[in-house]
């Protein structure tokens, strides 16, 4: 049985969530789509809002948040799989 690569999973999840948060911020700004999602996440990610600057801030927060979660998931999986 192989272990999960902790760094790779953390980076992968961080990148995917950062892109998703950025796109949702832009869609909320331009189309109003996902405004409730951006507002809810903005209550956790300081500065995240439906603006270009807010979308970039949300992407940074998302990268950090999901990256840390990915590292924890991979680490825990590797420990439990032994």
Image: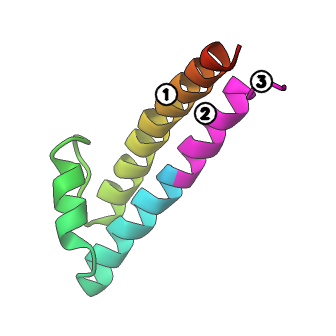
Residue 62 figure quarter: top left
Q: Which residue is mark 2?
A: 10
Q: Residue at x 47, y 39 (%)?
A: 66
Q: Residue at x 49, y 51 (%)?
A: 18
Residue range in magenta is: 1-16
5 with respect to 79 (left or right): right
33 with respect to 56 (left or right): left
Q: Main secondary structure of the magenta part?
A: helix
Element type at marker 1?
helix
Comes first in the chain, label 3 or label 2: 3
Q: Residue at x 21, y 41 (%)?
A: 44
Q: Are marks 1 and 3 in contact (CB under 8 Å)?
A: no
Badge 3 crowding class, 10 Å Cα cut-off, few under 14, some 14 to 19, many 20 or more, is: few
Q: Which of the two marks, 1 or 3, is nearer to us in this view?
A: 3
Per the rendering, the mark at residue 38 is none
Q: Are marks 2 and 1 in contact (CB under 8 Å)?
A: yes
Element type at marker 3?
loop
Q: As rendered, which of 21 and 81 lies closer to the eye?
A: 81
Q: Residue 22 in the image: x percent, y percent?
A: 43, 61
Q: As rendered, which of 31 and 5 lies closer to the eye?
A: 5
- The N terminus, quarter of image: top right
Q: Is residue 71 above or below residue 51?
A: above
22 with respect to 82 (left or right): left
Q: As rendered, which of 23 and 68 lies closer to the eye?
A: 68
Q: Which residue is mark 1?
A: 68
Q: Residue 70 in the image: x percent, y percent?
A: 55, 33
Q: Is residue 10 above or below residue 35?
A: above
Q: Is residue 27 above or below residue 39?
A: below
| Residue 42 falls within the magenta-colored stretch | no
Q: Which residue is mark 3?
A: 3
Residue 65 figure quarter: top left
Of all residues, the one furthest to the right in this rendering is 1
């Amino acid at each position: 049985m192989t272990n999960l690569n902790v760094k790779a999973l953390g980076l992968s999840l961080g990148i995917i969530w950062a892109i998703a948060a950025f796109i949702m911020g832009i869609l909320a700004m331009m189309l109003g789509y996902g405004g409730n999602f951006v507002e809810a996440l903005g209550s956790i990610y300081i500065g995240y809002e439906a603006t270009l600057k807010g979308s970039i801030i949300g992407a940074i927060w998302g990268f950090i948040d999901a990256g840390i979660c990915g590292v924890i998931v991979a680490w825990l999986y590797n420990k439990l799989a032994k």
